[in-house]
Image (cartoon, rainbow, N blue to C red):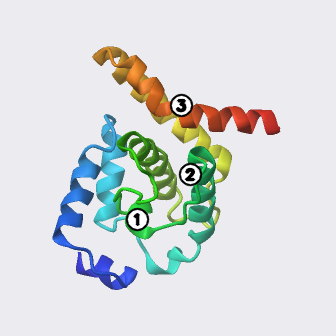
Amino acid sequence: MAKWEGDLRETIEMEQWHTIWDRASKSSVCTIISEKAYKLIFRWYYTPSRLAHFKEFWKMVARILSATFKLSIEPDPLSFLLGLPLTTLNTSDANKLATHILTAAKTLRAAKWKSTSLPNQQALITKVRWIRNMENIRAYLQDTGYKNALLWLPWAEFESAQSDST
């Protein structure tokens, strides 16, 4: 915990750490995705020399989040890397969707942590679609399809706008 605070030059309160761990445990029904969240917290994929390299990737993720929620969202390490809720989002559903998008981004980052190439926007969209499919299966099994569809509505609108612009 102290290493994250030193690298981010920010004090992370114990309550925030509890939130980080809680959100990591609930990040996905998929064990592989949850494992990546824990590994990131444990700095498994972290090397200070690669932080600057990934800065452009996180800016791209912020642009996608901004377009999805029609808000200005800036990259924030506490949210983007460690999983704290985005303060610019007002609802728990919006934060759940943002968590899915950020989980996809962190998964791609983990897959490319030794590479010199960055994941592109299409790779992120594909990974978010995969997570959405997993969440759709869970919603079907739990008979919460309508609620799940509402949660993913901003993403569906983002994808629709993307396909209209191409």
**Disc 3 and disc 2: Cα gap in Å?**
13 Å
Which residue sits at x=34%, y=59%?
A: 84
Residue lying farthest right? 166
| Image location of residue 87, percent across then percent down | 40, 60
Which residue sits at x=56%, y=46%?
A: 69
Which of these two is toward me, 56 or 143? Answer: 143
- Label 3 is placed on what type of residue? Leu
- Label 2 is placed on what type of residue? Leu
Q: Is residue 4 above or below residue 108?
A: below
Residue 145 disc label: none
**What secondary structure is marked by label 2?**
helix
**What secondary structure is marked by label 1?**
loop
Which residue sits at x=29%, y=56%?
A: 38
Q: In this view, does 51 lie to the left or right of 8?
A: right
Question: Reading the chain from its start, which is encountered first: label 3 or label 2?
Answer: 2
Q: In this view, does 75 lie above or below 64?
A: below
**Badge 3 is on which residue?**
153
Which residue sits at x=28%, y=18%?
A: 142
| Image location of residue 164, percent across then percent down | 79, 33
| Image location of residue 106, percent across then percent down | 46, 55
**Badge 1 is on which residue?**
45
| Image location of residue 145, percent across then percent down | 40, 18
Quadrant holding the N terminus: bottom left
Question: Reading the chain from its start, which is encountered first: label 3 or label 1?
Answer: 1
- Label 1 is placed on what type of residue? Tyr
**Badge 2 is on which residue?**
65
Foreground label between 3 and 1: 3
**Disc 1 and disc 2: Cα gap in Å?**
23 Å
**What secondary structure is marked by label 3?**
helix
**Disc 3 and disc 1: Cα gap in Å?**
32 Å
